[in-house]
Amino acid sequence: MAVGAHSDSEPVGPQLAVQDAPRFLNRELSRLDFDERVLAMAEDPHLPLLERVRFLAIFSQNLDDFFQVRVAGLKEQVLASVAVASPDGMSPLEQLKSIRGRVEGLVERQTSLYNSGIVPALAESGISIVRADEVSKKELSQLHTVFRQQIFPVLTPLAVDPGHPFPYISHLSLNLAVTVRDPQRRQQRFARVKVPPVLPRFVPLAEESRFMPLEDVIALHLQALFPGMDIISHHPFRVTRDGDLDDVDSDAEDLLAAIQTELRRRRRHARVVRLEVDPGMSAEVLELLTRELELQPADVYQSECLLDLGSLTALWQLDRPDLKEEPWTPATQPRLRGIGAEVPDLFAVLRSGDVLAHHPYDSFATSVEAFIDQAASDPNVLAIKQTLYRTSGPGSPIVRALIRAAESGKQVAALVELKARGDEQANIAWARALEEANVHVVYGLVGLKTHAKVTLVVRREGKSIQNYVHVGTGNYNPSTAHGYEDVSLLSADPDLGADVTELFNLLTGYSRQHRYRKLLVAPSSLRTGITQLIDREAKAGGRIAIKVNNLIDPDIIDALYSASQAGAEIDLIVRSMCSLRPGVPGLSERIRVRSIVGRFLEHSRIFRFGATGQPDYYLGSSDIMQRNLDRRVEAVAPVTDPKLCSRLAEIFEIALADDVLAWELRSDGSWHHVDPERGLNSHKRFQELALERARGNGVVSLIKHA
């Protein structure tokens, strides 16, 4: 189904009678609604083919994440007999049952799209995914050589019998369940062969652009793994385990050691939450797997296409520009370009006024990276302090700059969040690299995950000290900065500098700081600050616009409901989970909710309070979730420069006018693609604006046909 083809008769998500519905939408089902919008991108025939392949891979990866975190958490609640219902009134068991039904439908659509849409379209474009019964004799001969030289030495078949216990099946691993028979004893045995993740998932055949899945190549050569045995059957299967580390004891005397211990423990003992299998698997083998993995039938999902479609990213990386979007090169704002010099003096630029960068349209390299790089090289810079949640590792230009600064004698402090999900091991590795370079590495506050994106640069200027700060919505990761939509504020504002100084003192030392001059900081002041700003607009003529990834906090949602009832007009741009039910008479009829899903991952968090004139703008790291507001360190900063406020107004205006990538949430909980009228694609429009600004065209027209 095409993204642009949805109509009122084709909603995404469940439909309910509003009068019978609770005041909140279920967060887990709302997350699956988002995944369905991603799947719709893969179904859109108007997109370049390899972009559709990329969205199909993202959808698969999103489901993996959903099971290892959200489903795993619900299962823990069921096992612990937690009777507390979610805000929408569903028990953990009811949620798991609803999730099962929704996921089955999504997997069916995914399977149909892959088998009947993507694979034939790839073949027509000269990229063939070949299965075992489709190889020529020449290709089979080549595969024998590849198997012997490159694959066979890596494989370790593991038997299951009285002398060999059932092996550990690692998280997200792809495996072959093999049944063999001893021709002499006439006994059947089960064996597991792990498909090595260190090898490419798709093996190129003699003819370029023809690829065979690695598990099929292994299956063709099972006789080499079990010589003298009869191969009765073989079927792929895949396991998903609990992958959340949020329950690690933050009171541990050595948090680094605690995280490492928990990672090792989870590699061996994390509970299995999903088993994906080939539909042709025999009942006996399936029963063996479910028993040994301690699963119920409801935990088993059958798929009639390749397992782990997240690996399709390998095909997206093929050198086929004709099947992809035109590459985007981020632009550099005129103020950040050198005037008569190769590199601008960023500190002089910031002393003349704040800078706002909208990534990936504005370059991350010539704004945030350049800011930290110049700070590392400037002999007048005395100290650099930075929070690091996710980055691209020791090779990151930012990490290298911090190491260089420390080696030159500057005071450098890095707050590394060890519990950044999925990046725990990587964060440990580059945290140690920073420590070896004499960077002061700390791991944050007890019981709180540090999610704030802030940097402080302390510089000697004459006889005084000047603070420069960066507050952003995205991670200090050059890789994701090319694909994630985020905003960055660079400033020399004294009050903001003082606030960030005190925030770092809180993070690295002992402090009971609760009040800040300008910053809204979680968990101390962010919730109350946002609530007060919402309450201020709770009147006729009040105006609120919020752009976040997730909006599920019941108290903030209730505040928005009250503001709507009092007469405020409210626009919410929520990429993923939204528990607020818009458009309900007497509750939320003045609230509109939309989601934008496209080429770039919408990731910025921007807040606007007030009608035309001089509304208040804020940006920062926090979503509207209980974990962000109450259990994390978050930082949200006001934007006061009129020119920068205009840039944020522009972001809202274009995002709210988008009718190509946008979806709208209705009061019954269903999502509908916005009917295209002007054909405005916000991502393409932001690209145009960035190029116009880079050329120095001055005032630009915000809305035009894209």
Image: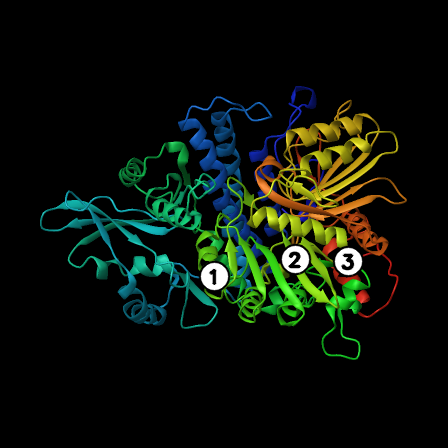
Residue sitting at x 77%, y 63%: 350
Q: Which mark is residue 685?
A: 3
- The 10 Å Cα crowd at callout 1, few under 14, some 14 to 19, many 20 or more, is some
Instruction: Left or right? Give the position of 314 relative to 698.
Output: left
The answer to whether mark 1 and mark 3 are in CB contact below 8 A is no
- Rounded to the nearest angstrom, the CA distance separating label 1 from label 3 is 43 Å
Residue 79 sits above or below residue 438 on the image? above
Instruction: Left or right? Give the position of 530 relative to 250.
Output: right
Q: Which mark is residue 415?
A: none
- The 10 Å Cα crowd at callout 2, few under 14, some 14 to 19, many 20 or more, is many
Residue 614 sits above or below residue 127 on the image? above
The percent coordinates of residue 533 (x first, y second) are 77, 36
Q: What amino acid is labelled 1 in the image? A: Glu
Q: Is residue 45 visible?
A: no
The percent coordinates of residue 31 (x first, y second) are 58, 39
Q: Nearer the viewer, residue 271 or 137?
A: 271
Label 2 sits on residue = 456
Which residue appears farthest toward the top when viewing the image?
A: 20
- Rounded to the nearest angstrom, the CA distance separating label 2 from label 1 is 19 Å
Label 1 sits on residue = 435
The percent coordinates of residue 144 (x first, y second) are 29, 68
Q: What amino acid is labelled 2 in the image? A: Leu
- The 10 Å Cα crowd at callout 3, few under 14, some 14 to 19, many 20 or more, is many
Q: Specify which label sits upstream in the sequence, 1 or 3.
A: 1
Instruction: Left or right? Give the position of 106 relative to 563.
Output: left
Q: What amino acid is labelled 3 in the image? A: Arg
